[in-house]
Image (tube, rainbow, N blue to C red):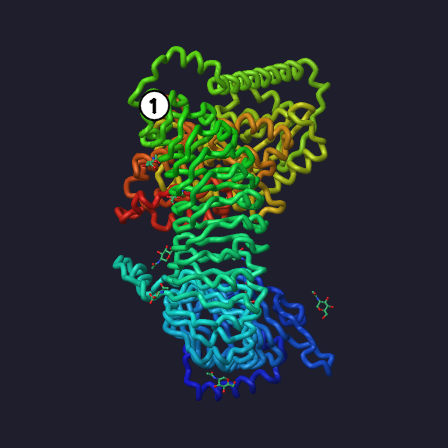
Amino acid sequence: MASTCTFPLFLSVSLHLFLATFASSSEADILLSFVGSIVDSSSSLSTWSSSSSPCNWTGITCSHADPSTTLLSVTAVDLQSLNLSGEISPSICSLRSLTELNLANNLFNQPIPLRLSECSSLRVLNLSSNLIWGTIPEHISGLSSLRVLDLSSNKVEGKIPESIGLLSTLQVLNLGGNLLSGSLPSPAFKNLTELRVLDLSLNPFLTSEIPPDIWSLEKLERVSLQGCDFYGEIPDGSISGLKKLTHLDLSQNNLTGGVLMLASLKNLVSLDGSQNRLTGPFPDGICNRNNALVTLNLHTNSFNGSLPADSLGQCRSLERFQVQNNEFSGDFPSGVWSLPKIKVIRAENNRFTGEIPELVSMASQLEQIQIDGNGFTGKIPHGLGKVKSLYRFSASMNRLAGEIPPNFCDSPVMSILNLSHNGLSGRIPALQKCRKLVSLSLADNSLTAEIPQSLADLPVLTYIDLSANKLTGSIPQGLQNLKLALFNVSFNQLSGQVPSLLISGLPASSLEGNPGLCGPGLPHACPDQDSSLRHHTGSLAILAPALISIAFGIGLLMFTAGFLVYRKSSKQKTEKITWHSVFFYPLRVTEHDLIAGMNEKSAIQTCGIFGRVYILTLPSGELVAVKKLVNFQNQSPKTLKSDIKMLAKIRHKSIAKILGFCYCDDSIFMIHEYLPGGSLGDLIRQQDFELKWSERLRIAIGVAQGLAYLHKDYVPHIIHRDVRSNNILLDSELRPKLTDVALDRVVGEAAFQTTVASEAASSCYFAPECGYSKRATEQMDVYSFGVLLLELVTGRGADARGESGDSVNILKWVRGKINITNGALVILDTRVSSGCEPEMLGALDIALCCTSVTPEKRPTMPEVVKALQSLSSGSCPQSLGFSSSEEHQLPV
Ligand SMILES: *[C@@H]1O[C@H](CO)[C@@H](O)[C@H](O)[C@H]1NC(C)=O
Ligand SMILES: *[C@@H]1O[C@H](CO)[C@@H](O)[C@H](O)[C@H]1NC(C)=O
Ligand SMILES: *[C@@H]1O[C@H](CO)[C@@H](O)[C@H](O)[C@H]1NC(C)=O
Ligand SMILES: *[C@@H]1O[C@H](CO)[C@@H](O)[C@H](O)[C@H]1NC(C)=O
Ligand SMILES: *[C@@H]1O[C@H](CO)[C@@H](O)[C@H](O)[C@H]1NC(C)=O
Ligand SMILES: *[C@@H]1O[C@H](CO)[C@@H](O)[C@H](O)[C@H]1NC(C)=O
Ligand SMILES: *[C@@H]1O[C@H](CO)[C@@H](O)[C@H](O)[C@H]1NC(C)=O
Ligand SMILES: *[C@@H]1O[C@H](CO)[C@@H](O)[C@H](O)[C@H]1NC(C)=O
């Protein structure tokens, strides 16, 4: 790239040369010369050939550059997202009418081509998301017609040149996500009076005051200055002139480039960056003349003083208000509570005072309130219960007092409540209406009376912390039916017997400080074990498992019966059963061959929840796996055929192929490719499961890729709905293949629901929301995948037996271990973990994220694939320092 570094004098000479060479050439020649230096590894530009008009080529737009002629000229070259690499040649500037050049999202790895500044008619230059490095050349000012400059997400470094001020027509300037450094050229910005969008975010080495001139650019709509190293104050009154501002993000200017640089050199010296923060009060006037503000994000800085209440109360369009992690004090601006469009209020970790007003009921869009760690006082208003969109209310560590209003949890989507460490009194309300409540923290208040029985009816309640209150009475029996990851009632005045199923999975510290409680493992045995046992037998708690096993028994009987009847009829009057078969591969086999081959001998161990699998040798000698589904719901043959065809078209290395299927009135046989490695579930459950960690990770990545493909790439998008280790088969090289994909489409939704519903209660693969959600979601698959990943990390089956011999839900076990022993290391499968701890802990983190109780917190499968792949690069290095157990907090 010597040419990009040439001396300006030489530049003008070469410009003349260019004009001489190209001015007379046709546009096709110019473009072909441009593409000559580009490496097009995906052959995306195969249409670029001199045999057709360039206006027909991929990415080329032509229009009448000059209205007086009928001639079309090339005005836009848009080659974004085509995996292009090689070199961006400035020869493109010979296209006299070129106004738009978009090469975003490719693999160009070079400095910004200096001579692009010769494209003097260019209005849009988009080079974002490449691997572009080097500094922004002073000559950028040559692009004197530029409206849009997007260099975001590259590795551009150095200072922003002062000459940027000469681009006075610029409307969009996006330099976010680079390695820019130094301070901003203060006077330059004054000239950019047309600027609508300014994005300098995520440049951690940009250590600068924010030039006050920025605040006088009246046309600004979006200002993104987060994640840099800006410091200093924002002058009083400066932002009141921004009438069109919709989006202001100044968050997380706490990075202090120096610290980051040191950290990246693995030199963990911590510097005090506190003087390098945005500080001082936030200026008045932001919504005085502006009705458009949607987002105001100031979080994680060192702003102090009180917020301008009058002005903020006028932000009628405001949706997101984030001021958390600052040093704000004084009364919280009360008008914000009742803004008509407000969705998110985050103000935790400041020193705000004041009360939450009754008028909060007016904020009918409010979804999330986080005000933990402030000095809020007063009662929790009734008005809060009237906001039906609220899903998170967390106000721990304040000075709230009085009773919790009975309508407190009336929002049907409420999931997370945290009122711990306040001065609340009175009883805990019944909370019947919030069927989606996952986490309830009321620790360290002065709550009295009993724990409401009704908590046991909340289907997804998973975290309950009622510790350090004045609760009395006994622990409701029903609570043991919840899938609890945390239950803490320590330091209350509870009494009586602890429900037996509850006590087994619980660390002692969850119950301590209640002298009246009794039961096994507690200081006091219960006075009369016998009578309490009798009492139990009558209770639902014991009955429920019994009922399940009876139901299961009946199911099994029906299944066997069905099978026998079928076999009998097939022997006696085969001709009366009409079979239909559809093969997607040339299988030389008849239904009768299949039926004849399906017997006890060919049945393999693993039994999915929908039926048995048989391994058959076809007359050709080929092996196939046949799954017999009992067709509960009579789907129309047409739907059935089109659904299975849709599934059979899936082609992915991690998804087992469907070779064909046969069906009659009461059965469906799905014919799959045979995989000699058996199921992953069987493998994990073997005593001598010693698959190396690298193999396990490879399997995990394969499965994740398969799911990502189903979720995002295959059309129509598919949700697997039954991800579990038994449904992962392995080929001879232990490559994973998913089976039983979207069986709901085969057996029908209703049949799927009934079968799954009986299973869901006992299986830990199903996400908590399966219990109440009508619709299957990708996040449910992600959850199940997380459980599978836990099996690989721990080497335990999802339903392995615990120390005492009873079945232990793996999630409960893992969470219990992390909670109690304060060490994630104990969880890792010691048979293979030596030297691989960092990778396995990384995988554990991913698994815990995937199994977050709140679906929104879970990553998507493509994200999981990326995260897992980034682990695998290390290939188990020996003894790198691994993350401490403190980092393994439970995601909620
Ligand atoms: C190319 O464009 C011409 C008109 O300019 C049009 O008639 C022709 O169909 C196009 N060819 C292709 C392959 O699109
Ligand atoms: C770009 O390359 C990646 C990986 O090589 C590939 O998955 C993707 O399909 C390619 N995209 C295009 C548009 O060719
Ligand atoms: C630049 O291209 C990227 C990739 O297509 C796109 O996301 C971005 O919005 C474009 N930038 C501007 C300012 O339009
Ligand atoms: C502002 O623009 C004018 C004219 O375009 C130019 O002469 C001046 O040097 C620019 N100022 C800065 C600071 O860039
Ligand atoms: C900046 O704040 C974030 C969020 O609180 C924190 O995670 C990060 O460690 C902080 N960085 C520095 C350098 O203080
Ligand atoms: C805000 O912080 C600045 C700098 O730390 C300090 O000088 C000022 O007194 C503080 N103001 C308030 C109101 O606390
Ligand atoms: C509730 O708040 C306390 C104090 O801020 C915090 O320690 C705890 O983790 C929170 N609980 C949940 C489940 O978020
Ligand atoms: C239960 O709460 C008490 C007091 O709040 C705390 O000390 C203890 O660590 C908690 N135990 C568990 C298992 O969370």
Above or below, 871 against 441 in this view is below
Residue 848 in percent (x, y) is at 41, 41
Q: Quadrant of the N terminus?
A: bottom left
> Which residue was labeled with disc 1?
516
Which class describes the residues within 10 Å of circle 1: few (<14), some (14-19), or many (20+)? Answer: some
Residue at 34% x, 14% y: name it: 527
Above or below, 362 against 88 in this view is above
Instruction: Tell me the element at label 1.
Output: strand
Q: Quadrant of the C terminus?
A: top left
Question: In what quadrant does ligand 8 lie?
Answer: top left
Q: Nearer the viewer, residue 702 or 189?
A: 189
Q: Is residue 319 left or right of residue 162?
A: right
Residue 64 in percent (x, y) is at 70, 77
Q: Nearer the viewer, residue 535 or 761?
A: 535
**Would residue 57 be seen by someone viewing this image from the given angle?**
yes
Q: Nearer the viewer, residue 380 or 53?
A: 380
Residue 346 in percent (x, y) is at 46, 53
State yes or no: Cβ of the residue under disc 1 lies below 8 Å from any atom of ligand 8: no
